Image (cartoon, rainbow, N blue to C red):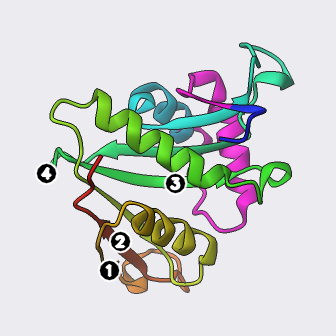
């Protein structure tokens, strides 16, 4: 984690900033602002934000510089599904996305009953940054990666949506 930032559990008050970071990313599917508020309430334990160290609870100083959202997959309770990862433009290029991913995986492995032994995520083929992020994570953890199309573009209601490629990374050793 860059030393001026700290890993934190998202709060409902972070929902608007997380929505804005997702919107400004230019690559993520933007969900409703309401869904980000719910995510911060219901999936905070399996999500994380990076915020300025000592940022407190209010004002600009405490706003997230990046976020990662996830959940433990009900059908595979030792698998963390990473939903979205994004870093606010002024904080890009500092390894923050990788730090968020590493920090979240370590926290969920530590706090989940039985831990986790793998992660899943979907990435569109053209999302170079996310493809690199997850490939690097797998390499650092010496974990195999399986890739397959999970949702082809024709399943989405809007035309022109790229396929979502499932990345299964694991088993992980901690």
| Identity of the residue drawn at 72% across and 60% down | 25
Between the residue at mark 2 and the residue at mark 1, the CA separation in whole angstroms equals: 5 Å
The answer for how far apart the CA atoms under marks 4 and 2 are is 16 Å
**First along the sequence among labels 4 and 1:** 4
What residue is drawn where x is 47% and y is 66%? Answer: 134
> Can you identify the residue that label 3 sits on?
84
Q: Which stretch appears magenta?
A: 6-34
> Percent position (x, y) of residue 99?
58, 47
- Could you tell me which residue is drawn at 50 percent across and 68 percent down? 136
Q: Is residue 4 magenta?
A: no
Q: CA distance from mark 4 to mark 1?
A: 19 Å
**Res 95 quadrant in image:** bottom right
Image location (x, y in percent) of residue 135: 46, 72
For disc 4, the neighbor class at 10 Å (few under 14, some 14 to 19, many from 20) is few
> Where residue 13 sits in the image (x, y, percent)?
64, 22
Which of the marked residues, 2 or 1, is nearer the chain's N terminus?
A: 1
Residue nearest the observer in this picture, 14 or 108:
108
Write down the residue under mark 4: 75
Mark 1 or 3, closer to the camera: 1
Q: Which mark is residue 147?
A: 1
Crowding at mark 3 (Cα within 10 Å: few <14, some 14-19, many 20+): some
Give the vertical position of 104 relative to 92 (above or below): above
- Label 2 sits on a secondary structure element that is strand
Q: Secondary structure at mark 3?
A: strand
Q: Which mark is residue 167?
A: 2
């Amino acid at each position: 984690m860059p030393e001026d930032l700290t890993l934190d559990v998202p709060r409902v008050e972070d929902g608007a900033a997380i929505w804005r970071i997702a919107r400004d990313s230019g690559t993520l599917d933007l969900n409703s602002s309401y869904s980000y508020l719910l995510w911060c309430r219901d999936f905070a334990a399996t999500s994380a934000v990076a915020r300025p160290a000592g940022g407190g609870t209010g004002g600009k100083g405490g706003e997230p510089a990046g976020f990662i959202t996830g959940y433990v997959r009900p059908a595979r309770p030792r698998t963390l599904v990473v939903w979205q990862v994004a870093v606010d433009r002024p904080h890009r290029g500092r390894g923050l996305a990788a730090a968020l991913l590493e920090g979240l995986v370590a926290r969920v492995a530590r706090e989940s009953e039985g831990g986790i032994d793998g992660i899943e995520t979907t990435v569109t083929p053209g999302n170079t940054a996310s493809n690199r992020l997850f490939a690097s994570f797998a390499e650092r953890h010496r974990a195999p990666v399986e890739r397959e199309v999970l949702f082809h573009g024709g399943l989405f209601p809007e035309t022109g949506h790229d396929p979502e490629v499932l990345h299964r990374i694991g088993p992980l050793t901690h």
